[in-house]
Image (cartoon, rainbow, N blue to C red):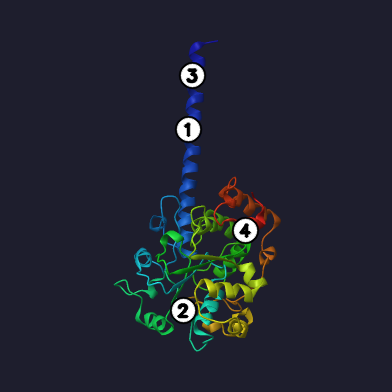
Amino acid sequence: MNVSSASHRALLAFVTTAICGGFIFHKLFTKRNRSREDLLRKRRLIFGTKEEEERYYTNESLPGMPLLPITSKNTLTKCSAMQCDGSEIFICSYPKSGTTWTQNIVYTLVSKGDDQFTHISEYAPFFEIDATWEEGGELIASIARNHQKIQRRIFNTHLRWEQMPKHPGARYVYLVRDGMDVCASFFYHLSSQVEGGYTGTSAQFLEEWLSGNIAFGKWSDHLKSWLGPDKIDERVLVVRYEELKSNLQETVSKIALHCKISITEDEIIGLLPKFSFDYMRSHKSQFQPQSVTWKDGFQFIRKGEIGGHHELFSIQQKVAFRRALIKEFPGQLCKQGMLHLALESYQIC
């Protein structure tokens, strides 16, 4: 064999490989950049969250949590720095876990059945939105007056435990719901908004939701923050959505006792009709979000069913969700702290 010819062929092969490799690298790099740009665009225009560099990180051990455009980092600072006086009741949850339902329950218990309000947020405001706060870090005057009137400071929030103000007398009610039902309800919620609504399929939504790209981040991260091994706290009452559905009176009584609300069992029984989904649907203007315009026919107070996700997600998607849980909660982690309250039905341990 001619050495010069062989060397020439080897050099040609090397150059060809380098060119092809460079072309492939360029294509992958370009695709990666486009994917990132697409993701940022989706976050801005579809999910209503801030750009990646604006994401707020709760602490070093948890990944970032995308924020709603009605929440600023400055407001989150006000939330964590709020001076509590022990009269606080925080209704805490990942979105679509029964927050509005429990707002109604807690306010109705505290007020002994008052229904002469325009909107529930007048007495149980969304804690982490800018509109709740004055520039100086105080609650807006109307909320402060209403809290003074009922002698309790009620808030609903989707923040994590690390972001919350703490006080020995404050009470926290943390709601958990079947993760797939949460995802399905969140999909209907976001895709039914006229402006900035989600426009993808339910399959695409599930993928984004599992990746933590939807507002408030991963469901699993929220659970770890509130229910993890080091999060057992007597101030926190964990309430399962399914318990509210199956045994409303007993669960409401448990909430009243935990929150130190002075009310008798007979009074609770008398108020039960006001705790129902039917009541909230018939008074929807008092409970549905005020800052959102919904598509025709959408009901914010929907069915509230257990297992509603079966109508939306395929078997393959349910399997993908379970695999994601196994990855998020390896080994015996799902049995530690209070995580079992949210995960035991999945049998992943």
* Relative depth, front residue between 148 and 197: 148
User: CA gap, disc 4 to disc 1?
Assistant: 38 Å
Asked if residue 117 is positioned above or below residue 36 in the image, the reply reads below
Q: Position of residue 334 (x, y in %)?
A: 59, 51
Q: In which quarter of the view is residue 181 placed?
A: bottom right
Q: Mark 2 highlights which residue?
A: 121
Q: Are marks 1 and 2 in contact (CB under 8 Å)?
A: no
Q: Secondary structure at mark 2?
A: helix
Q: Nearer the viewer, mark 4 or mark 2?
A: 2
The residue type indicated by label 3 comes to His
- Crowd rating for badge 1 (residues with CA inside 10 Å; few <14, some 14–19, many 20+): few
**Residue 270 as seen in the image, left or right of residue 109:** right
The residue type indicated by label 2 comes to Ser
Q: Are marks 1 and 3 in contact (CB under 8 Å)?
A: no
- The answer to which of marks 4 and 1 sits earlier in the sequence is 1
Q: Are marks 2 and 3 in contact (CB under 8 Å)?
A: no
Picture disc at residue 19: 1
- The answer to which of marks 2 and 3 sits earlier in the sequence is 3
Asked if residue 279 is positioned above or below residue 186 in the image, the reply reads below
- The answer to which of marks 1 and 2 sits earlier in the sequence is 1
- Crowd rating for badge 4 (residues with CA inside 10 Å; few <14, some 14–19, many 20+): some
Q: Nearer the viewer, mark 2 or mark 3?
A: 2
Q: Secondary structure at mark 3?
A: helix
Q: Position of residue 59 (x, y in %)?
A: 41, 53
- The answer to which of marks 4 and 2 sits earlier in the sequence is 2
Q: Mark 3 highlights which residue?
A: 8
Q: Mark 4 highlights which residue?
A: 203
The residue type indicated by label 1 comes to Ile
